[in-house]
Amino acid sequence: MSTRRDFLQQSLIAAGVLATTNSFAESMVEKGRMTKLTILHTNDVHSHVEPFPTNHKRYAGKGGVQNRFNLIQKLRKENSNILLFDCGDIFQGTPYFNEFGGELELKLMSQMGYDASTMGNHDFDNGMDGFLEVKPNANFPFICSNYDFSNTILKNHTIPFKVFEKSGIKIGVFGLGIKLDGLVDKKLYGDTVYQDPIKKAEEMV
């Protein structure tokens, strides 16, 4: 969805750059050394457990969990300071989601060693109860900074930020979500309160 991609480019990535500038870079300077940090991220995977068909017009043979895992492992061998995130829309798009409701996707992400994820609009497709049912299959946190779940069943099941440490460097991470109104049926996200992502990013930084 182009609207979501635009949001990610203009808001989430920009906010991440600000966070890095104010914390990670200053921390490195104070220590008088430079440390290489590689940040890997996926988004809009949409339950593509298997690669695209070999006869696909645009992405023939590309994608899929095994290809993704192979690339991640290759990069991990090159640099131990790696953080792996997903920016949402993990679910929906193939029969795997229809059959397993997201359980398989989260199990595979856990095996690949994801550090954290946020939630996209399609991660609400089975409602908050459906998400909560499969969430235990994720051994990583869901970071949702601008969704207030206080009056929903997801209260205390996500976190607003997390601080990671690599080679003595602390990296603060927060996650921003797109406005759900108009994209997601109200009954699927209930009393979730959407908060302005720019203001929330400034607050997090």
Image: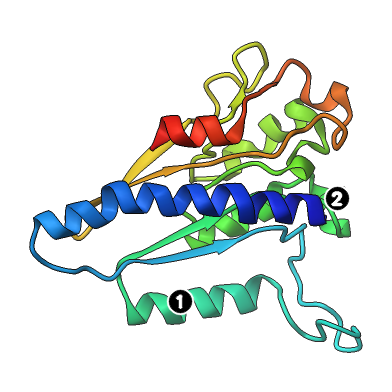
SS class, disc 1: helix
Residue type (three-letter) at the residue carrying disc 2 = Glu
Q: Quadrant of residue 176?
A: top right
Q: Is residue 113 above or below residue 202?
A: below
Residue 144 visible (yes or no): no
Residue at left offset 49%, top offset 74%: 72
SS class, disc 2: helix
Residue at left offset 56%, top offset 48%: 12
Residue 45 visible (yes or no): yes
Q: Which residue is mark 1?
A: 73
Mark 2 or 1, nearer chain start: 1
Residue at left offset 86%, top offset 60%: 94
Q: Position of residue 95 (x, y in %)?
A: 88, 58
Residue type (three-letter) at the residue carrying disc 1 = Gln
Question: Could you say which is closer to the camera, residue 149 or residue 66?
Answer: 149
Residue 19 in the figure: left or right of residue 30: right
Mark 2 in CB contact with mark 1 (< 8 angstroms)? no
Question: Could you say which is closer to the camera, residue 13 or residue 159?
Answer: 13
Q: Position of residue 116 (x, y in %)?
A: 49, 48
Q: Is residue 33 above or below residue 147?
A: below
Q: Which residue is mark 2?
A: 99
Q: Position of residue 36 (x, y in %)?
A: 28, 71
